[in-house]
Amino acid sequence: MSNIPKISEAEWEIMKIIWNKNPCTANEIIKYLEGSTEWKPKTVKSLISRLLKKNAISFNEEGRTYYYYPLVNEKECIKEESKSFIQRVYNGAAKNMLLNFIEDNKLTEEDIDDLKRILDDRK
């Protein structure tokens, strides 16, 4: 069983900022999101609170300011989310997901060479 918490789509937006700008304050997160979402500061603070409860993040207190930092590794979260997605959408069949991706996306020669190399390495 993984110790990676289940993170909602909105919480992912907060986590991306915290992973990128570690540590950061709630006001920094709010300011960063101003152009890309219509979330009110209260919404952002609620999402931060949910992430704290899930033990995805923690904080250091300096005076009256809280500096948030991640408790979970970004790559591990992505890996866990990928597994969950493949299980949920493709019944665990990564091959079907990969085939669907390849058929529906324009791949460059470089992309194809990279995929071949990765598959050869897995043999």
Image: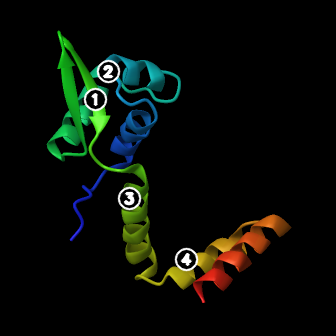
Give residue 25's position: percent from left, percent from top. Answer: 32, 21
Image quadrant where one finds the N terminus:
bottom left
Q: Amino acid at mark 4?
A: Met
Quadrant assignment, res 58 = top left
Density class for disc 1 (Cα within 10 Å; few <14, some 14-19, many ≥20) is many
Q: Who's the residue at 43% across and 18% down the image?
A: 31
Contact (CB < 8 A) between labels 1 and 2?
Answer: yes
Sequence-wise, the earlier of marks 1 and 2 is 2
Residue 26: assigned label: none
**Distance between the Cα atoms at labels 4 and 1?**
35 Å
Direction top: furthest residue: 63
Residue designated by label 3: 76
Residue 97: assigned label: 4
Residue designated by label 2: 25
Residue designated by label 1: 68
**Horizontal side, residue 32 vs residue 102: left or right:** left
Residue 108 seen in render: no
Q: How is the image coloured?
A: rainbow
Q: Amino acid at mark 2?
A: Thr
Quadrant assignment, res 106 = bottom right
Sequence-wise, the earlier of marks 2 and 4 is 2
Q: Amino acid at mark 1?
A: Tyr
Label 2 sits on a secondary structure element that is loop
**Horizontal side, residue 86 vs residue 61: left or right:** right
Residue 83 seen in render: yes
Label 4 sits on a secondary structure element that is helix
Density class for disc 2 (Cα within 10 Å; few <14, some 14-19, many ≥20) is some
**Distance between the Cα atoms at labels 1 and 2?**
6 Å
Sequence-wise, the earlier of marks 4 and 1 is 1
Sequence-wise, the earlier of marks 3 and 2 is 2
Sequence-wise, the earlier of marks 3 and 4 is 3
